[in-house]
Amino acid sequence: MIVKGAERNENALLPLQSVQIQGKLSGLFATIDIDLTYVNPSKDIALEATYQFPLKPDTCLASLEAELNGKTIVAKVQDKEKARETYDNAVSAGKATVLAERTTNSPKSGEMQIKLGNLNPESTMKLRLKLVMQLEIKYSSYQFFIPMAFFPDYSKNGVAADAFQYDFKYNLVVESTNKLQSIVLPEKARLVSKSDDGLQAVVEGTERVNNVILYWRTVEMLKPHLLFAKDEERKEVALSASLVPTFEPPSP
C-alpha cells in the first residue's frame, strides 16, 4: 500500500501487520474474505493510503469495510463523481473515509483502487474485503489462486527483506456435491482435514510463496452440470452451466 502524508507531499510504503484470508470454494465459484491490517508508524502525520490490486471481470467486490481511527466505515455504492466528491469533502474535513473504484484496462483485466483518508498517527487500520469470483478450470481441474497483491513482497520496492515482516494465514474450505477425487496443494500448504464422505476438505497455509494455487477434481466434474437459483419475489431464475473440456478418454 502506497501512502502520502496529509501534511507533506511525500510517498512511502505503509507497513502491513497481518493478512488473514478465509475462502469457501464450491463448484465454479469462490467467496473470499480478506482482512488486511496496516499501521501508521508516523508520530505526527496523518496519512492518505492507496491500495491497488488486480480484479478480473469475473470477480466482484461484494463488500468493503475499513476500521480507521476507532471507527468502522462500511462502503456504499454511489455514482463515481458523487463518491469522489464525498471522499474529498470528508478528507478536507479531517474525517476518516474510504473510496473504492474499479478500473478496466482491457476486456480481460482490471484493477481495484481503494483510498483511505486520514489515518491518524501511530494508529492501526484494518481493511476487510469480500470477493466473489468465478473459478477457472485448468488441467481438467478446478483452479483457485490468491493474487500476490494480497501478500506483497516489499523487497520488490527496494526495502530490505526483513524490514517489513507481517503475519500471513489462509484457510480454504473446498465443498462439493460429489466426492472429491484429488487435491493438489499450494506450496508449503497442508491438508487440515477431509470429511469422511469426501465432500469437503480444508486447506491451510501460513507461509508466503510466489504462487498460492490450489487444484482439485471431483468424481463427476467432467459431466455437464446445470445449476439454478430462483428469486420468488422477482420471479427470476439464474442459471449456470458447467462444461469441462478434457482430452481424457471416456470411461468404458
Image (cartoon, rainbow, N blue to C red):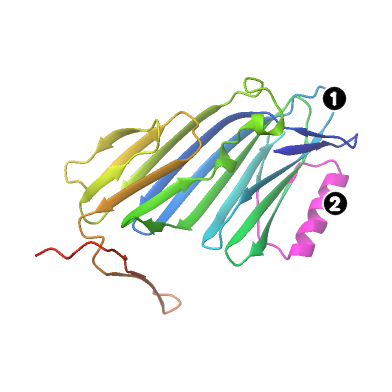
| Residue furthest top as drawn | 162
Q: CA distance from mark 2 to mark 1?
A: 22 Å
Kindly identify the residue that appears in the image at 64 percent across and 55 percent down.
Answer: 111
Question: Nearest the camera: 170 or 137?
Answer: 137
Percent x, y of residue 95: 80, 42
Q: Position of residue 152 (x, y in %)?
A: 60, 36
Verify whether residue 93 appears in magenta: yes
Q: Quadrant of the C terminus?
A: bottom left
Along the line of sight, the residue nearer the viewer: 252 or 136? 252
The residue beneath circle 2 is 89
In the depicted structure, whether residue 98 falls above or below residue 124:
below
Q: Is residue 199 visible?
A: no
144 and 49: which is toward the camera: 144
Residue 123: percent from left, percent from top: 72, 27
Residue located at (21% from left, 60% from top): 220
In this view, the residue in front, 79 or 208, is 208
Which portion, as a residue range, is magenta? 74-97
Would residue 198 be seen by someone viewing this image from the given angle? yes
On the picture, is 180 further left or further right than 79? left
Q: In the figure, is residue 10 to the left or right of 110?
A: right
Q: Residue at x 52, y 58 (%)?
A: 59
Task: Name which residue type carries label 2.
Answer: Asn
Q: Which residue is mark 1?
A: 44
Residue occupying the far right of the picture: 8
> In the figure, is residue 127 to the left or right of 182?
right
Image spot of residue 240 (x, y percent): 37, 70
- The reply, left or right, for residue 126 in relation to residue 169 is right
Amino acid type at image mark 1:
Asp
**Residue 231 colored in magenta in the image:** no
